[in-house]
Amino acid sequence: MHRYLLSALIGLSLFDSALSQFSPGFPYGSEKVRGVNLGGWLVLEPWITPSIFDNTGNPNIVDEWTLGEYYDPTTATSVLQNHWNTWITETDFSNIAAAGLNHVRIPIGYWAFEVGPGEPYIQGQLPYLQNAVQWASQYGLKVIIDLHGAPGSQNGYDNSGHRISYPTWQSNQTNIDRTDAIIKQIVSMFVGQSSVVPIIAPLNEPAGYYGSTVLTPLKQYYYDSYGNIRYPYGTSTQSNIVVLLHDAFQPLSYWSGFETTPNWQGVAMDTHIYQVFSDADVQMSWQSHINTACATQSSLPGFDLWLMVGEWAPAITDCATYLNGRGSGARYDGSYPGSTYVGSCSGLTGSASTFSSSYKTFLRQFWEAQVISYEKVNGWLMWAWKTESADEWSYQAGLQNGWIPWSPTDLLYPTICG
């Protein structure tokens, strides 16, 4: 009996020793994540760069899949390369660091790594991802590499690369196997740079609201991703990379106890909080938006993994052109199918030069209410760094026009949540 007890204790001490060796490239849990998403760069989104889609002259081009499907391949390749070269540059990384931020989250699609038969995607994104990691290192920023689109689409959104009525990622094991292989490839590329790439997010916004048909295979994929990211060497040797799981639009209570210590380590949870994607959201008063943000101070803390709000914005309408998809309107002005008119979009989206001083003051208050609230957990990454024509969503425009401070701790309304 004593022999078994001794071996158990030895095993436990070895386990503790293995755990103690885990050293992520950022002190999650003790320092706040303050960051921004480089949205619409390596994965196109029509609402972030509507001109790319408008310039095709083809209304059937609604995402990156259809850009490759319906557009002349040579022209499409040229358009994409120009976009990759100009949308985000080293100057952006310099400015992000100068704004007091410490993280960037970079969405990328599976097609950057491999394209299957019949998939019309155009490749060439990877050198830009590698440049981004180099720039981040140069300016002291940490990178979250986020797999934003998976084979078959995990949510059917245009930001998954392929806008379809129902996601098919989860219904085909080949899709999931391909995704596993891509995660292994991402890890192999950056495992030696974990001081700059401390986190990999294996899947953005899987459509968990469809229930067990998505959630059951998703949980298995998350288990497999843990092995692929945390143990990439095929042995008991751990990496220093954190696994960032999206909550799949489920309440945090659904994930309570999932991949928690002592058997798991280096796992964080990502939740996305927007107040624009329902009729009820866009009907709220300005004060109600602030109150709703402040209310997360009671709902977010206490979760058993590191928790960050990986997407959010000071936007309060869905007025931005193509926000709901190219060819779709807005709930706010009643142009979205089945919606009811709330008000005119004029002066609420587009250029900040059209924003009233009271609206800009509100944007500052709402931004601060969210930052204060999300720092009650492990921090935040705002969506997005820049947009073509929707300044209310743009961190860059917020800095330039005064509703985002040049230091995220420089608050004008520190008691906005009471």
Image (cartoon, grey):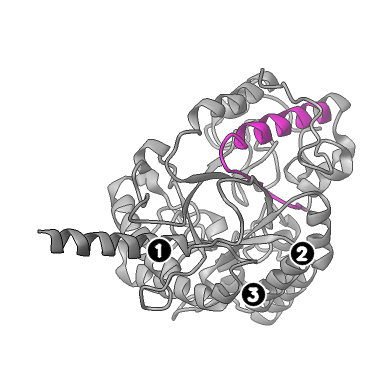
Q: What residue type is labelled 3?
A: Gln
Q: Give the range drawn in magenta.
A: 360-387
Q: How crowded is mark 2: few (under 14 residues within 10 Å), some or many (20 or more)?
A: some
Q: Which residue is drawn at 64% across and 80% down?
A: 73
Q: Which amino acid does label 2 sit on?
A: Ile
Q: Mark 1 points at which residue?
A: 17
Q: Which residue is drawn at 54% across and 74% down?
A: 191
Horizontal and vertical percent for residue 280? 55, 25
Q: Residues under labels 3 and 1: Cα distance?
A: 39 Å
Q: Which of marks 1 and 2 is nearer the N terminus?
A: 1
Q: Name the residue under label 3.
A: 125
Q: Residue at x 83, y 45 (%)?
A: 397
Residue 316 seen in the current view:
no
Closer mark to the observer between disc 1 and disc 2 = 1
**Circle 2 — which element?**
loop
Query: What numbered label is drawn on residue 88?
Result: 2
Residue 64 seen in the current view:
yes
Residue 255 quadrant? top left
If the image is split into quadrants, where does the C terminus sit?
A: top right
Residue 285 quadrant? top right
